Image: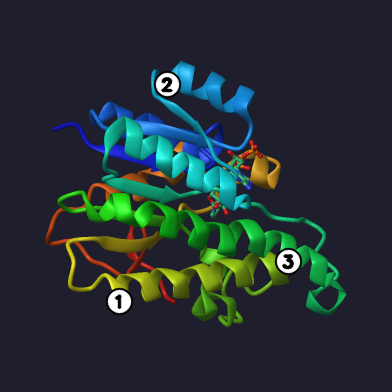
């Protein structure tokens, strides 16, 4: 039977590539996007369904879950990909407005929990559902504290801590779902050229999508509660 996936923030960037690559594997990849016009246009290009979904708007998330239930009755894969950054953090953590943290957390942290909880009943109906949370190497505490490493200088309070929180959220759900076939993992796409970073990344969005696709299609012997990139596990 054809599997069904929901990818949040799939109208562009890494999320779009995840939807495209899952589609290439014969999976119905529902394009979740907050903007109806951009989302529909992306879904049309991909030949995939569209659902409007703003991860910060619980009503839209509930409506999306209801629509998926009505259309498919089940959800095999959830990729929590939608994410934002506010690039004004070079002044350091002490100069970062608390409201910036709130805004980033609304999407990168609370949005993931909202979407996951809304989709969980549908994921539980699948034989072996997969949840993938798009994290970042900037969320790694170990890499952040490596004085000689490349991440020491990237001390962005709101974005980095939001991804660290997402890592713990990943572990927390993996533990709750430990005795079920559902696997929950965090993906590090690496530094990819997308709108998020003014296209400064050295990797393509397609390259960034690959690890999420791998975790979305893990076999029964795959990990849960892991933090992975192309090369394998990444330091928490
Ligand atoms: N690019 C990198 O180097 C990199 C590295 C590590 C991790 N990541 C993570 O990878 C994920 C995708 O990033 P990207 O680089 O592809 O960024 P992007 O091109 O800016 O795409 C982000 C996507 O998230 C959507 N989004 C933002 N807020 C949303 C909301 N409230 N509800 C629904 N959708 C929302 C955006 O929609 P709109 O078009 O409407 O804004 C867009 O579709 C993010 O979680 C990011 O943190 C990226």
Residue 103: horizontal and vertical position, in percent? 73, 60
Question: At 71% across and 42% down in the image, what residue appears?
Answer: 198
Other-residue count near label 2 (Cα within 10 Å), few / some / many at <14 / 14–19 / ≥20: many
Q: In this view, does 178 lie above or below 53?
A: below
Name the element at disc 1.
helix
Task: Read off the residue under disc 2.
Answer: 46
Other-residue count near label 3 (Cα within 10 Å), few / some / many at <14 / 14–19 / ≥20: some
Quarter of the image with the N terminus in it: top left
Does 109 sit left or right of 133 as displayed?
right
Residue 2, quarter of the rendered image = top left
Task: Read off the residue under disc 1.
Answer: 175
Residue 94: horizontal and vertical position, in percent? 84, 79
Which is more N-terminal, label 2 or label 1? Answer: 2
Q: In this view, does 159 lie above or below 70?
A: below
Which is more N-terminal, label 2 or label 3? Answer: 2
Residue 126: horizontal and vertical position, in percent? 20, 49
Does 159 sit left or right of 13 as displayed?
right
Task: Read off the residue under disc 3.
Answer: 102
Question: At 24% across and 31% down in the image, what residue appears?
Answer: 25
**Residue 215 in view of the camera:** no
Does 116 sit left or right of 147 as displayed?
left
Whether label 3 touches label 1, CB < 8 Å: no
Residue 230: horizontal and vertical position, in percent? 35, 54
Colour logic: rainbow
Does 154 sit left or right of 173 as displayed?
right
């Amino acid at each position: 039977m054809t599997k069904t996936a929901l990818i949040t923030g799939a109208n562009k960037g890494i999320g779009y590539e995840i939807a495209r690559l899952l589609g290439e594997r014969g999976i119905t990849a529902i394009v979740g996007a907050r903007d109806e016009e951009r989302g529909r246009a992306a879904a049309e290009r991909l030949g995939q369904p569209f659902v409007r979904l703003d991860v910060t708007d619980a009503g839209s998330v509930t409506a999306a879950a209801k629509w998926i239930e009505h259309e498919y009755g089940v959800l095999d894969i959830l990729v929590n990909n939608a994410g934002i950054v506010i690039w004004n953090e070079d002044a350091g953590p002490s100069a970062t407005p608390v409201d910036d943290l709130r805004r980033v957390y609304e999407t990168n942290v609370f949005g993931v929990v909202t979407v996951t909880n809304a989709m969980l009943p549908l994921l539980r109906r699948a034989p072996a559902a997969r949840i993938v949370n798009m994290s970042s190497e900037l969320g790694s505490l170990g890499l952040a504290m490596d004085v000689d490493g490349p991440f020491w200088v990237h001390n962005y309070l709101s974005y980095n801590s939001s991804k660290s929180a997402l890592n713990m959220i990943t572990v927390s759900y993996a533990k709750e779902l430990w005795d079920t076939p559902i696997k929950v993992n965090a993906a590090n796409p690496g530094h990819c050229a997308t709108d998020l970073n003014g296209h400064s990344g050295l990797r393509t969005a397609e390259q960034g999508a690959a690890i999420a696709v791998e975790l979305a299609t893990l076999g029964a012997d795959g990990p849960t509660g892991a933090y992975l990139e192309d090369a394998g596990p990444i330091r928490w």
